[in-house]
Image (cartoon, coloured by chain):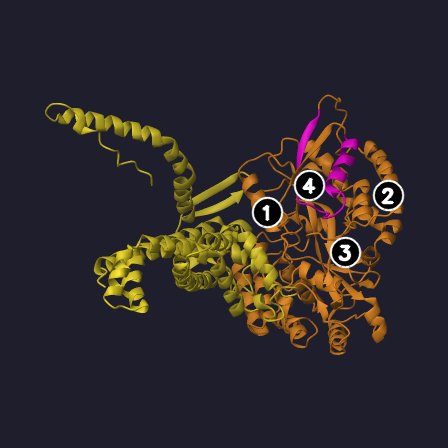
Chain colours: A orange, B yellow
Amino acid sequence: MKPLLMKSPARRKGAPHRTTGSRILATSAIAMSVAAFAAAPSASATAKNASSVTTITWWASPISTSGPDLRKVLIADFEKAYPNIKVNLQTAPTDTDTNRADLVTTISGGANTPDVFMGDVIWPGQFGAHSLALSLTKVMPKSFFSRFASGLVAGATYNGQVYGAPFFQDQGFLYYRTDLLKAAGMAVPTTWQQLQTDAVTLVKANKVKYGFVWEGDAYEGGTCDFMEYYADTGGQVLNASDSASVLNLADVTKVLTFMRGLVTSGASPQAVDTFQEPEAAAAFQDGDAAFIRNWDYQYAAAQAKGSDVIGKVGVAPLPTFAGGEAYPGYSNIGGWNLYINPHSKNVSADTSFINYMTGTAAETVMATQFSEIPTNAAVRANPAVARLNPPFAVLAKTRLVPRPAQNPNYPKISQAIYTNMNSALAGSTSPSKAATDMASQLSAALGSSGL
Amino acid sequence: MLAPTEIAPGPPATLPGPPRVSHEDLIRRNLARLGWGFTAPALIVIAAFTIFPILFSIIVSFEKVNVSGSGFSFSGLTASNYSIVIKAALWHHALWFTTLYTVVTVLSEIVLGTLFALVLERLTAGRGPMMALLLIPWSLITVVSAELWGYIYNSSYGLLEGLFPNVLGHPFSATIALMVADIWKTTPFVTIIVLAGLVMIPTELFEASEVDGAGGWKTFWRVTLPLLRPTLGIAVLFRVLQAFGLFDLPYVLTTGGPGTSTESLAMLAYNTMFTDLDFGPGTAVATSTALIVLVMSLVFLRVFKAQVGKETPNA
């Protein structure tokens, strides 16, 4: 199965994670933050009389896939807090590229709806360069941006303007089978080499079918996984001004050789070059894999009904290369931002909406009831939130690496990375040839001189 | 496209007296005007939704295009989009892959479709249900059938996994896998067309060849096949046009991978336009693809016409 859902790394699969405790926590947080917003003069709808109701359209793909619809829950809360604004939910395609194609034609065609759209974290460069999103720097007070966890606003910035408000975050984690590791007397691996050795040992001993599963297909998620290994060597893709390639051929070759080695050594299945999140998650949840690299929803999904590994899953930061960067290794940043359509006629209502959705109330609901990593630093720091979801407890220990998405040609940059990574992984190109191909396609992408 | 030039002439036989050319002309002209009036709505729709987009994309392919929140802006005519395309290794590969894919699938479908049609034509009982069964693959939307093939090919839980592990993980086997899915889906279409052609062949010809002592094999090569030629020509034309526009199968099954080994021209055009927002080079890929198909079809029609002219059934 290759469900259209989850084709992008930021696509969700996790079952909602609900507890009574979390509900109480969320309710009290809502009460607190509504009071806080009422006092905040910044973007909240100011003293409009009740008769003038503004309706805005929110374009968002489904976030939760089972249980109540997170989007509708948040909208209902918002409308309660802002009775003068009604939100009309427009469901976006679940495939991130189709989603973008629809938005590009809609916005470049001059449509004033949707007013606010939920878009991938890798869009700010492209959308900023093509004026497909309104600069939030121009419509939000400076203080607004200080609520987010560090690094997120920088990731949503292009040319000094912030285009997206971080809505929820995602990142790579290493999940492992606690029972298998314990029985074999293994510690959680801190280096990629150790992970490979452990995986091979477990497979050879017939303890498990696959050692380590991850996302190696030729798609955006392949770039995410590659960036993690590559950052662990100390490598960077673009220079500080995001304008030129600084790809280190030796490091890329080293990474690709290691990735291919995972397959040839038997640590990862041959088929990992066709794995996206659903395939990798299926293998892990069926009890067929000892380790998996996946996004934050994997923990909840592995504990949900239908999983064969309930109660046998641990989570840790990703490993690093022995002789490379220090432990922990880098995790790639995924997730979604909220953007404003530059043609929107209701910018003040849009800003109120974004203010609410990234505020403590909404972010607490997302974190406690839907297992999403909050972007709001205050919510993230709340120990009660961290207790509810084990990956959150690991968050503070992880190190993040963004994809080189600040360049407006990012889609081509990413294609240069994932297609060549995938060729090397499949064994159809040697790692060194794939590395030089990657470098030359990267230069072509940056110079806009190729397809 | 729908130019109504062939307006039925007025009924001259009913006109009494000597033929009055001017009156006839008047009627004809009125009828023609009426014809244009009736077809105008359809023509306007076609102009708006087919002709305008085609012309627009040809124009765009010669422009430096910038997409922005305020729409498309053009800055000057240029041929650079085409030079970018022609120099690009991605385009070379996509052209090679699409051509190979078209040749192999269309040839296989024609051979298999003809065989199926021959069998179906001889079936004395159950032809209806068999036809209905055959049409199921054809009637499935390609995206749906691609998802179904995904269950078969999937490398972690696919039905074929035990027999051919990781089919979609190697360029060669992924190409074959896509071709198989296409042949499975489209052979019924060829079968139906060829069956229609078979039914049209007069039975006397078969009887005559039997009387002349020709065996089944000889009858097929000398009678059936030459008479099927126009039908096969149509089938090939339809299939080539469709196969060259290959998009949904690889989009769903391989996303063009491993690497870019199964990226078709249509996928390349789509990615260039809607992922990279490079509408100039993207429309250049699309326009050049259409041009290639057009030239191929014209050449094919000419060759095919010449052959039909030469060959007359003489069994």
The tag earlier along the polypeptide, 2 or 4, is: 2
Q: Which SS class for mark 1? A: helix
| Distance from the alpha carbon under mark 4 to that under mark 3 | 37 Å
Mark 3 burial class by Cα count in 10 Å: few <14, some 14-19, many 20+: many
Q: In the rendered image, is residue A377 in sight?
A: no
The tag earlier along the polypeptide, 4 or 3, is: 4
Mark 4 burial class by Cα count in 10 Å: few <14, some 14-19, many 20+: some
Chain letter of disc 1 in the image: A
B304 vs A364, left or right, is: left
Q: Residue A272 versus residue B202: which sits nearer the camera?
A: B202
Which labelled disc corresponds to residue A137?
4
Q: Disc 1 designates what residue?
A: A100
B311 vs A305, left or right, is: left
Q: Specify whether residue A78 is painted magenta.
A: yes
Q: Residue A419 versus residue A376: which sits nearer the camera?
A: A419
| B66 versus B133 height, above or below | above
Start-end of magenta stretch:
A53-82
Q: Disc 3 designates what residue?
A: A301
Q: Give the amino acid type for the residue marked by disc 1 in the picture.
A: Arg
Which labelled disc corresponds to residue A23?
2
